[in-house]
Structure formats: C-alpha cells, structure tokens
Image: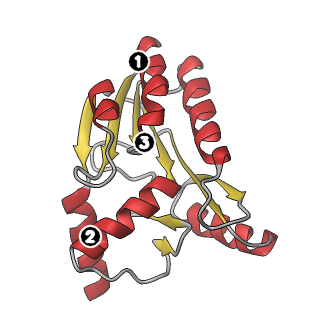
C-alpha cells in the first residue's frame, strides 16, 4: 500500500487544543505545538507510520507574522518530516482559504497522477466531502483521521472509506510527552 497524508493544520490545531483542554492536558509549545499555528502528535513522525511509510506527508496551516515567523514554522514542520505550506493571515479569527485550496489541489493532483492508493486526511470539516468523493471516484481509498467528538462532520465521516479516531492516541501521546 502506498499512501499520502494530508493535514488541515488549522482545523487540527483548533480542535486538538479543545480535546487537550477537555482531557486536562496543558500543551507546551515546542516541537509538536505552536499556539494558533500547528499541532501534531508527539513521537509520531509524519513519515514513520506504524504499518507503512507514506510516500509524502503534507501539512497546511497559517499564521499571523512576518517572513521570519513563517520560516520558523516551516522549519518546525520540516523537522517533523512534513512537506509544508504556511500561509500568512491578517487576523487571528480568520481562516486562511489558502489552506483548504492547497490541500484540495494537492490531494486531487496526487490522486490523478496515481502517486498513492490511500489518502489519510486529517480534517473534520464537511467542506472536504466533495474532495473525498472525487478522490474515491479516481479509485483511491480515503481514511479520515480526526477526533470523534470534536468538530467531525458526520457527512465527511460517511463520505470516507474509513474513519480513524485519533482522540485517545493524541491525548495519551501528549500526556506521555509532557511527563518525560
């Protein structure tokens, strides 16, 4: 199986922070978390999955800041083995449209070029339903990886071939990381 990973970092960060708060886990900024910008699962490299190595892993996010702040975030995501796209935004409360558009474009192009058989999409937003349906129409399997009770669109889950609930793993990995 060859697969690729596509992460809507804005959505994952916002929802991951809520999951951590509900679990009583206070996240610490560093390699796996940057406030209002990105979050990832500690000790889980983008290119070292338990069952197989992805062809490529993409992470899309945005932030308020200058080119140095963007470069610093790109460096952090690169260290986690992600191909990254970091967009600049003006206000914190706005969602950068570039994130959704870039993710959609890359997932479709890579599917069309037959560069993967399985796509792991870390997102919960129902806006991705047409993307999932089109990628499936191209003969690819789409696995949604997200939090079961925090921002997961039922339509997106049902559009996918499979749903992986990352809630418990996310919380356990963060607890272990913070205790080490």
Q: Residues within 10 Å of mark 2 (few under 14, many from 20)?
A: some
- Total marks drawn? 3
Q: Quadrant of the N terminus?
A: top left
Earlier residue among tags 1 and 2: 1
Foreground tag (2 vs 3): 3
Which residue is the site of mark 1? Answer: 136
Quarter-wise, where is residue 124 in the image? top left
Which element is circle 1 on?
helix
Q: Are marks 1 and 2 in contact (CB under 8 Å)?
A: no
Q: Quadrant of the C terminus?
A: bottom left
Could you say which is closer to the camera, residue 11 or residue 167? 11
Which element is circle 2 on?
helix
Q: Is residue 3 visible?
A: yes
Check residue 125 in the rendering and tell me which mark sits there, or answer none: 3
Which element is circle 3 on?
loop
82 shown above or below 155 = below
């Amino acid at each position: 199986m060859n697969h690729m990973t596509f992460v809507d970092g804005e959505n994952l960060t916002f929802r991951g922070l809520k999951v951590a708060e509900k679990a009583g886990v206070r996240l610490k900024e560093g390699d796996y978390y940057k406030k209002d910008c990105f979050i990832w699962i500690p000790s889980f490299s983008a290119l070292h999955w338990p069952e197989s190595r992805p062809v490529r892993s993409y992470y899309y996010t945005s932030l308020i800041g200058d080119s140095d702040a963007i470069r610093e975030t790109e460096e952090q995501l690169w260290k986690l083995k992600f191909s990254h796209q970091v967009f600049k935004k003006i206000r914190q409360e706005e969602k950068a449209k570039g994130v959704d558009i870039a993710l959609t474009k890359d997932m479709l192009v890579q599917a069309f070029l037959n560069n993967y058989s399985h796509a792991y999409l870390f997102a919960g937003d129902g806006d991705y339903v047409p993307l999932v349906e089109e990628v499936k129409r191209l003969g690819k399997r789409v696995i949604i990886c997200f939090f079961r009770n925090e921002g997961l669109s039922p339509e997106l889950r049902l559009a996918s071939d499979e749903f992986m609930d990352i809630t418990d793993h996310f919380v356990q990995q963060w607890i272990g990381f913070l205790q080490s």
